Amino acid sequence: MNALPFRWLFAALSLCILIEFFSNDRQSQNKRMKDLRRCAAAPIILALAGVVCAQNQTPLVPAGKTLEIAEHIYVIPDQRVNLVSNIGIIVGRDGVLVIDTGMGPKNAETVLGEVKKITSERIAYLTVTHFHPEHGMGAQAFPPGTTIIYSMAQKAELMAKGTDYIRMFKGFSPEIAELLKPVRIIMPNVTFAEEAEVNLGDVSARLLHWGSAHTLGDEFVFLPGDTRGTRKNGPEQIPASSVG
Ligand SMILES: [Zn+2]
């Protein structure tokens, strides 16, 4: 079901309420009250327009925006686009760890392209911060031999809810449906209960599952040692919190 008409309907309805609100008061209110209400309306209308526009942006992982935020550590920022996750790339002497894939194989291909621009090292590991479609549902595009690793809790949640979430997300917009159409749900090769360490030779990452928060299988990726303590904390929050 395409949700677009409903969003416009919602926006139109809200607008009608606002006009009705004003017309009633325009006859009986003095000039100050009118001005006050006019000021109040502007942000609401803008916010409504913002919601509609944001939903309509195709959630594409951007190419050419990759940042090095510390030695070994790179991020592809989400550009504040709805349903685009921040992507982490950890480059070690013995291989690369990628954190999240973006929504669908098309976005994952962009991620793989960005890795190739940074290093010729092979992608040894892929981990995912949680099972929602914009985080891990591009795993099928990763090269054979990539070890997909995350917690048992996340695997169980993907098995239980993955297909339903794909169906739900497809209803958000035609663009999202297009990105998710080719998706095959790929299971991890390796799972852990609470913690695992990925050693890339000269840098290692600790994968941590501390219980449920945003989802039942949330994962944190912690990079100890000589990387100035920067770390990727949980779903959807890498650049601001870890660098600032
Ligand atoms: Zn999520």
Image (cartoon, rainbow, N blue to C red):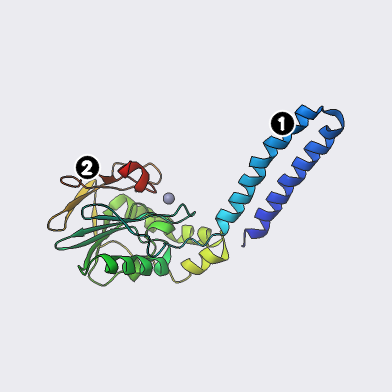
Residue 19: percent from the left, percent from the top?
78, 42
Q: Quadrant of residue 185?
A: bottom left
* The N terminus, quarter of image: bottom right
| Label 1: element kind | helix
| Label 2: element kind | loop
Q: Is residue 86 above or below residue 19?
A: below
* The C terminus, quarter of image: top left
Q: Is residue 56 left or right of residue 207?
A: right
Residue sitting at the far right: 27
Decide: few, some or many residues near mark 1? Use Cα within 10 Å; few <14, some 14-19, many ≥20.
few
Q: CA distance from mark 2 to mark 1?
A: 48 Å
What residue sits 33% from the left and 69% below the top? 113
Residue tagged 2: 229
What residue sits 76% from the left and 42% below the top? 17
What residue sits 21% from the left and 53% below the top? 71
Residue 27: percent from the left, percent from the top?
87, 32
Residue sitting at the far left: 201
What residue sits 14% from the left and 61% below the top? 93
Amino acid type at image mark 1: Leu
Task: Please tell me the numbered disc located at residue 36.
Answer: 1
Q: Is residue 223 above or below residue 108?
A: above
